Amino acid sequence: MAYLLKNILIYPIKSLGAIELNRALCLPKGLKHDRRWMLCNEDGLFISQRKFPEMTRFRLSDKDTHFEVHDPKTNSTIQIPYEIESGLETVTVQIWDDTCQAWTFSNEMNQWFSDRLSISCRLVFLPESYPRQIDLEYAAENEHVSFADGFPYLICGEESLQLLSSKMNYPVSALRFRPNFVFEGKEAHEEDYWINFKIGNVKFKAAKPCSRCQVPTLDPETGVADPNFNRVLVSYRLQNKKIKFGMNLLLNSPSDYIQINDPIELLTHA
């Protein structure tokens, strides 16, 4: 096989740790359970690693009916159910330039995160039926997205990560770029030229290359920033004055499952 899916990753709570899966359901807003939860301040504004790099320390694990969030600094764990029938109340939250409605959780959950981050924050949830439209410039069929920055899916190649690792002189984890899919391919950054492709039986359409901020400079294990990281990326990945790494995607077929080692078939490319 020329291309194989090697990793499937979800990030249930925006800006917290990843859960690696062997099999996942692809939905229009993104992988099931991916970035459906988010932490926000008292005004409803989302919080992320950009301002709070200590968010990298939380570890998430899949427990079938729920997921666990563990804080190694305080050796404390909280459980969050996957299936949520309704929230305590509906509130307005802001993520970048978007405002949308979300459900709130119990004060116990809010206090757990507030105590560990030393800021007043609350956990919110975005139901599948609640709208958050992607940028209309890139929409194909009025697509919507979860609490991800802008698009339902993100893919990058192992070879792209290997090239960056060679330039950084240390192994660069895919977690720095927070992709949903990592694939085994042929050449570094060949995903830049993909337009339509299939993973297993599920079709995807490329939306745009992913513009990167300072989050990839943070070590996903420690939250410590490498000041040289973006300088290296600028040296060979600067496009239109922005660092590009990985490709944003839209689902282009009915919801279905994919799994590790599914073949990837290119349908059209630049």
Image (spheres, rainbow, N blue to C red):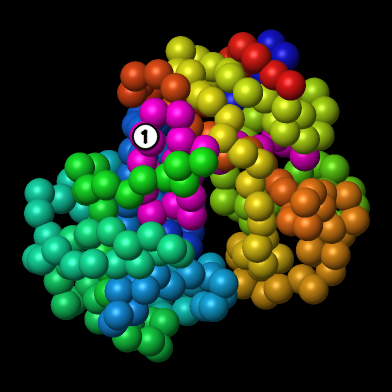
270 relative position to 29: left or right: right
Instruction: Using the rendered view, name the quadrant where residue 101 is placed.
Output: bottom left
- Position in image of residue 32 (x %, y %): 33, 38
Please say whether residue 172 is one of the residues in the magenta stretch: no
- Classify mark 1: helix, strand or loop: loop
Does residue 133 appear to the left or right of 211 in the view shown? left
Residue drawn at x 71%, y 46% is 245
> Relative to the observer, which residue lies in front, 226 or 214?
214
Task: Kindly tell me whether residue 1 is visible in this rendering.
Answer: yes
Amino acid at circle 1: Asn
Residue 238: x and y, percent? 81, 52
Q: Main secondary structure of the magenta part?
A: loop
Is 153 covered by the magenta stretch?
yes
- Please report the residue visible at 34 percent of the width from the left and 79 percent of the height from the top: 41
> Is 155 displayed left or right of 21 in the figure?
right
Up-down: is 253 above or below 150? above
Residue 107, given in percent of the width and then of the height, sits at 16, 77
Looking at the rendering, the stretch of residues picked out in magenta corresponds to 138-160
**Residue underneath mark 1:** 142
